[in-house]
Amino acid sequence: MAAPGSDVILERMMALHPKIIDLTLDRVWRLLAALDNPQDKLPPVIHIAGTNGKGSTQAMIRAGLEAAGHRVHAYTSPHLARFHERIRLAGELISEPHLTQMLEECYAANDGANITYFEITTCAALLAFARTPADYTLLEVGLGGRLDATNVIEKPELCIITPVSMDHEQYLGDTVAKIAGEKAGILKRGVTCVVGPQTDEGLDAIEAIAARVGAPLLIHGQHWHIARDGDRMVYQDENGLLDLPLPNLPGAHQIQNAGAALAALRYLGQPEVTYEAAVSRAFWPARMQRLRYGPLVDLAPGVELWLDGGHNPAAGEAIGAHLATLPKRPTHLICGMLNTKDIGGYLRPMAPHVASLHAVSIPDTAATLSAEETAAAATEAAITATVSHSVAAALSDIAARDPQARVLICGSLYLAGGVLRDNG
């Protein structure tokens, strides 16, 4: 009989704990010990926490390091279309046979004990990283930081905290200060941390924990600065000034993410070739991604189609600001969100820039808001809203009414992942 593929093993792993999220490190430490502690055998680790911008910042750092010839491991979550996207080994997505082998080893070593899906799959990633030669490991926190399954590296090469805002309040706390405190749980004694733009209360919380554990900080606005200058951007720190092109990832918020990436590369002593590569070669799907081909594009050939997986108020602010900079064109949203998110806070910043919203439920997702609930929230945010039974139906309806429209599919990484799968 053929050995089970990764999908089968991942499905088994979902049943190892009754909760999807249960923040503690005890189960992770137990399994890592059974695996002979792969977390202690990784190439130098750059550990990245924050509410928004983690993935984009990681993508820019990876682009920069790879331009200098480095082999780079990268771990991110959630995936969009396939689980394999979470684990990049020395620059390449993990293969199906390799992923299956790592999952099987972790499943056997766990021996049926309680462990969450994210915890056991993170252990699988660490095991794969430990066994594959590389120069750097980029580890993105899944949720929070202090109790996240990635927070098992005794002494990273560098930590990064991207902007912190309200999200996952039920797990991390009901103020920015509490959430920032959880993110700052990745800080380690003697390990420098690059800190992206923060609110005053967020920065206060990060600085307090850094002082307690003895972690030096490189703080935006104090130790490094970045700003747009016409169609370029300027980065400055104690080592001098960099004049660089704007990031190829769309959105004004990507400038601050680029700043954190550049601060990291400068701290790591990387050569000049890495700086422009970081901002010009990064790719990060479902972050204001323009869809240019595929069945959905064919469905509405005159429509300018975009996809974004942002899902909290800060993401709504960033999307609204970006929409305001685009050439004038009627803009319509196709939106589906999870019931754990602040949908009003997400939609209100976009309301002045959109003509309508088509609400959808996220397929095959138990925690989805119903299309009706999303439409009601949009109406409350002063957006004209319609209920649709699918993204394709919504897109067809918009194209029939406004064939040259701009359409943004948005509200959830789960929705974005489904769109990318369906669009081929």
Image (spheres, rainbow, N blue to C red):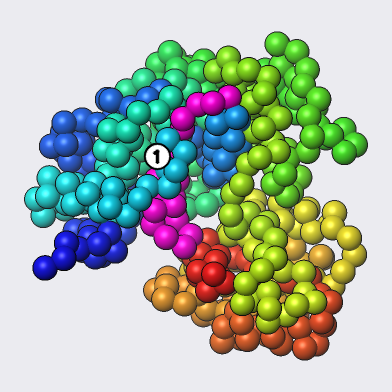
Vertical relation: 25 (above or below) 266: below
Instruction: Residue 201 in the image: state x and y as whole percent.
Output: 60, 34
In the displayed structure, does residue 392 sit left or right of residue 400? left
Instruction: Residue 112 in the image: state x and y as whole percent.
Output: 11, 54
Furthest residue to the top?
A: 239
Work out whether residue 41 can be spotted.
yes
In the displayed structure, does residue 86 sit left or right of residue 305? left
Work out whether residue 267 can be spotted.
no
| Residue at (40% x, 28% y) in the render | 134
Furthest residue to the left?
A: 111
Badge 1 marks a residue whose secondary structure is strand
Mark 1: few/some/many CA within 10 Å (<14, 14-19, 20+): many
Where, quadrant-wise, is the N terminus in this rendering?
A: bottom left
Vertical relation: 273 (above or below) 60: above
Q: In terms of image quadrants, where is residue 282? A: top right
Where, quadrant-wise, is the C terminus in this rendering?
A: bottom right
| Residue at (78% x, 29% y) in the render | 244
* 74 drawn magenta: yes
Q: Nearer the viewer, residue 41 or 17?
A: 41
| Residue at (75% x, 13% y) in the render | 240
| Residue at (29% x, 64% y) in the render | 7
Instruction: Residue 266 in the image: state x and y as whole percent.
Output: 62, 18
Label 1, on which residue? 89
In the displayed structure, does residue 106 sit left or right of residue 247? left
Q: Nearer the viewer, residue 145 or 289?
A: 289
Q: Nearer the viewer, residue 23 or 75?
A: 75
Q: In terms of image quadrants, where is residue 224? A: top right
Region rendered in magenta = 68-87
